Amino acid sequence: MSRTRSTSRTALLAALGLITATGATATVLGTATAGAAAPGCKVDYQITNQWNTGFGANVTVTNTGDPVASWTVEWSYAGNQQVTQGWNATITQSGAAVTAKNVSYNGTLATGGSTSFGFNGSYTGTNAVPATFTLNGVVCNGATPTTPPTTPPTTPPTTPPTTPPTTPPVGTKADNPYAGAKVYVNPEWAAKAAAEPGGTKVSNQPTAVWLDRIAAINGSATSMGLRAHLDKALEQKGSGELVVQLVVYNLPGRDCAALASNGELGPTEIGRYKTEYIDPIAAILADSKYAGLRIVTTVEIDSLPNLVTNVSGRPTATANCDVMKANGNYITGVGYALKKLGSIGNVYNYIDAGHHGWLGWDDNFGPSAELFKQAAVAEGSTVDNVHGFIVNTANYSALKEDHFTINDSVNGTSVRQSKWVDWNRYTDELSYAQAMRAKLVSIGFNSNLGMLIDTSRNGWGGTARPTGPGALTSVDTYENGGRYDRRIHLGNWCNQAGAGLGERPQAAPAAGIDAYVWMKPPGESDGASKEIPNNEGKGFDRMCDPTYTGNARNGNSMSGSLPDAPISGQWFSAQFQELLKNAHPAL
């Protein structure tokens, strides 16, 4: 999705010496009032993301004077910005004037202490950085006073805020866990990325920790376990909020349609799944030591949709998926995981909802939503244990196709009839995610349901990226010439040649979307190009073989996979380099 960041106002303020600006961050350097009697202060105002007529911002206030027991930060906008949602402060607005007051758990600021709060807002035209901020009535000048204050600070509010903060104290859940929060940078992935040529450009990006087998919970001499990651997350957290992303991925008979992702548990081993996998994860996450973290779980990717699309009666049916539909262990396992993990106050469950190239057709879309509802209420769980859904996990579907829409036609033929779209209702992941969200809410999921989109490998940049629609010769030339997604077929999923890094992780980028995330760590293989013996239960899937001529799932097309790939989850340098080269936005 295309977004631009307004920098003209920031540049002007910097030229006048009112702020120092780097990227999207502005540090206000106002002039202190002579004889002002209140704490010195510094305010950093950062636009964290911006899109169309919306934006997100984070504000950090540092007390450079005497300690305070409560605080009020105020500023005025030069334009028509309106705060629409806030967290870690009670934020009110009257005209252009904005007031942010501390909440019950962050009012105390020692000398040198700082705190952060954030918000989403709307605007039209330019989105100028405010020129001046005050703390408890005194203009922030970024310096420590050289003489003691001569009058007491402004009296703090005597009544509590009339509206609760969007992000409440530890123990209750935020509407959007990503809003106003940093996201955990997995040090194991970061080290591998940084060791690659050009990898330091992205090695500071947050990626998920995959718990794809029982042994991953405790780790080993060469890999971090779950506790080790959570301990490292506490170090990264500092005084603000931090999200840790976990992929919970070990169902019995896992991924019945793709051999490359098969797991360690057999189709009937639901007991082991509960007691040896989910229960130990839940016990660790429930440790009070980690109560201050926001823990996002992506629950069992690529599993539930298989029970709709890859069972008897479909040309893509597999015997393994028929087994899992018959024994019910996918439904049972997901329901159990949702209930067990959802009962923990700081855990946010997101169920995998496939992608538009899998579930976007009429006969897949509705039945899949109904199946998600069935799993959400299985094993005593309820829809309240589902904070949201994630789409495009470990897949390549473009975030937004700009050069054609589902409503276009060429010479009287609809785009839906093109070979690529093939009657799908959706052309990209953003439209699919928003439509799936609406459908899920309509069948009983919570109205504040949030969606995540994995953008780790769907950038499709580089020299092959189209700059406009294709020729109007036919609906196929029109669509093929204009689409960003350059796969040979929409059904290709393994280590795709030409793929690139997509949008960088960011919170609240579009309506109904909690975040763009890199849930699949770039550079980790989708599966081996040839059979490689291993102790992780991962089989050889011909869709990872670049010489394979395909099957019903990809229209009997070439697989489009890169050669010489290792088993799924292992580092694949050639893939990482491909993603760097074709990143969009470019690095």
Image (cartoon, rainbow, N blue to C red):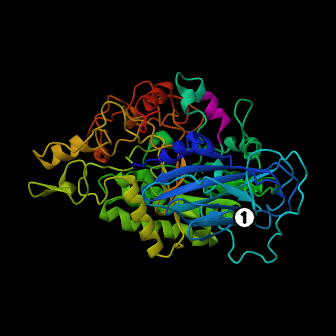
Disc 1 secondary structure class: loop
Label 1 sits on residue: 345
Using residue 409 as the reference point, say whether residue 527 is left or right of it: right
**Does residue 189 show up magenta in the picture?**
yes
The span shown in magenta is 185-192
Q: Residue at x 40, y 55 (%)?
A: 430
379 or 472: nearer the viewer: 472
Q: Residue at x 19, y 51 (%)?
A: 418
477 or 82: nearer the viewer: 82
Using residue 528 as the reference point, say whether residue 139 is left or right of it: right
Using residue 527 as the reference point, say whether residue 291 is left or right of it: right
The spot of residue 567 in percent (x, y) is: 51, 32
Q: Quadrant of residue 107?
A: bottom right
239 or 268: nearer the viewer: 239
Farthest-out residue, front: 34
Using residue 155 as the reference point, say whether residue 416 is left or right of it: left
Q: Residue at x 31, y 60 (%)?
A: 361
The spot of residue 555 in percent (x, y) is: 26, 45
Using the image, determine if residue 169 lies above or below residue 357. Answer: below
Farthest-out residue, top: 197
Whether residue 210 can be seen here: no
Q: Quadrant of residue 263?
A: top right
The spot of residue 1 in percent (x, y) is: 40, 50
Whether residue 537 can be seen here: yes
Q: Residue at x 69, y 41 (%)?
A: 215
Principal secondary structure, stretch drawn in magenta = helix
Q: Neighbour class for label 1 at 10 Å: few (<14), some, many (≥20)?
A: some
> Which residue type does callout 1 highlight?
Gly
Using the image, determine if residue 330 lies above or below residue 194. Answer: below
Using the image, determine if residue 415 lies above or below residue 540. Answer: below
The spot of residue 299 in percent (x, y) is: 57, 55
